[in-house]
């Protein structure tokens, strides 16, 4: 029985399935099953009951999970306490950023940490909000900026800002001038390219449209946010989304934007953390820097991001 075996066992108990656990733990299913059998053989008890839908922990399995969770948490605390005894914050900080506002502060975050805290190794990962929550839950991230609160009880979300969505288009692909400000109801006049309803901001746009009783002209749906810029560049339509995702193209004059009013579609930005894991000084430093950058971006781009009315100490309770 070792730490790796206990960590893998907890993954099996959490997902109630060796197959699902193998995907989340990034280990082949046969290898994970072998770890479980060896653990059962060593302890001389059956830890799970296997059935067609997955596995269910036995009384012995639940007791082992209780002790394993306590032991692994203690190991995290020991490691972090020893690291925190150093004069300067050090160690890794894994940060997840959204495809939207997160892109506005990615470079600044890395640059500031490198200059002010060179002993911190920051690693950035970008993805959609739902994937970032999964990576937080699996321990692949320490922090994340997200638009979608998860219902996982281990995760904590702080509402820190609201972000306005704009009509975006490729200037050279549009024959007629597009107003700088348009009403939401007038979006019906623009062929739209949007992600499918599995994406948070597509559901948000649909919600606003339903509230004012308009049917949007959605000509193309995509399974990923990134291809939208390529489709609008080819003149296949317009989109509604975050300016942060196309900031460079806007600054270079390739992409045009129009503010949407009556109503202005917006979404809430959250800072997400996994509260079941101890936090190192390195992660605390990066968290504080992220919050500072959000405030700075809101002051520099008030038309995009607003922190008005937010107390960064307020938490959104989940679970």
Image (spheres, helix red, strand yellow):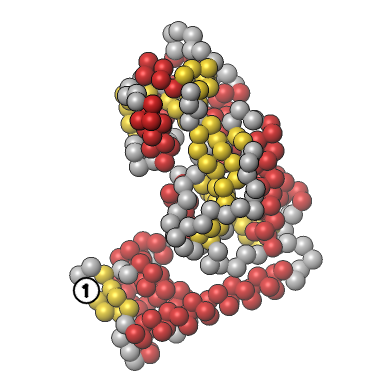
- What residue lies at 32% left-to-right and 24% top-to-bottom? 215
Locate residue 35: give its quadrant.
bottom left
In this rendered view, identify the residue nearer to me: 26 or 284.
284
**Quadrant into which the C terminus falls:** bottom left
Task: Give neighbour class at mark 1: few <14, some 14-19, many 20+ (Cα, 10 Å).
Answer: few
- Look at the image and tell me whether residue 44 can be seen: yes
Position of 160 relative to 213 (above/below)? below
- What residue lies at 72% left-to-right and 58% top-to-bottom? 119
Q: Secondary structure at mark 1?
A: strand
On screen, residue 228 versus residue 142, left or right, reads left
Which residue is labeled 1 in the image? 51
- What residue lies at 42% left-to-right and 74% top-to-bottom? 10
Q: Position of residue 291 (x, y in %)?
A: 66, 47
On screen, residue 59 versus residue 239, left or right, reads left
Q: Position of residue 148 (x, y in %)?
A: 46, 47
Locate residue 230: give its quadrant.
top left
Hey, which residue is sitting farthest left in the picture?
A: 52
């Amino acid at each position: 029985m070792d730490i790796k075996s206990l960590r893998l066992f907890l993954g099996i108990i959490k997902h109630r399935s060796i197959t699902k656990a193998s995907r989340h733990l990034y280990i082949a299913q046969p290898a994970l099953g072998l770890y479980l059998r060896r653990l059962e053989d060593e302890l001389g008890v059956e830890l799970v009951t296997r059935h067609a839908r997955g596995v269910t922990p036995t009384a012995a399995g639940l007791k082992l999970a209780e002790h394993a969770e306590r032991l692994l948490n203690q190991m995290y605390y020991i490691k972090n306490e020893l690291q925190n005894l150093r004069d300067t914050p050090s160690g890794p900080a894994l940060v997840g950023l959204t495809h939207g506002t997160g892109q506005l502060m990615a470079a600044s975050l890395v640059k500031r940490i490198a200059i002010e805290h060179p002993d911190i190794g920051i690693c950035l990962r970008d993805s959609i909000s739902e994937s970032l929550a999964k990576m937080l839950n699996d321990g692949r991230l320490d922090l994340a900026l997200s638009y979608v609160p998860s219902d996982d009880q281990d995760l904590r979300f702080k509402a820190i800002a609201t972000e306005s969505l704009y009509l975006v288009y490729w200037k050279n692909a549009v024959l007629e001038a597009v107003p700088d400000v348009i009403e939401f109801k007038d979006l019906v006049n623009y062929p739209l390219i949007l992600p499918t309803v599995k994406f948070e901001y597509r559901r948000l746009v649909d919600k606003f449209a339903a509230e004012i009783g308009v049917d949007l002209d959605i000509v193309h749906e995509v399974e990923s946010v990134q291809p939208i810029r390529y489709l609008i560049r080819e003149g296949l339509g317009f989109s509604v989304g975050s300016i942060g995702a196309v900031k460079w193209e806007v600054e270079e004059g390739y992409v045009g934007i129009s503010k949407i009013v009556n109503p202005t579609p917006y979404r809430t930005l959250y800072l997400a953390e996994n509260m079941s894991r101890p936090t190192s000084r390195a992660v605390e430093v990066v968290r504080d820097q992220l919050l500072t950058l959000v405030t700075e971006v809101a002051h520099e781009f008030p038309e995009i991001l607003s922190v008005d009315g937010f107390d960064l100490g307020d938490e959104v309770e989940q679970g």
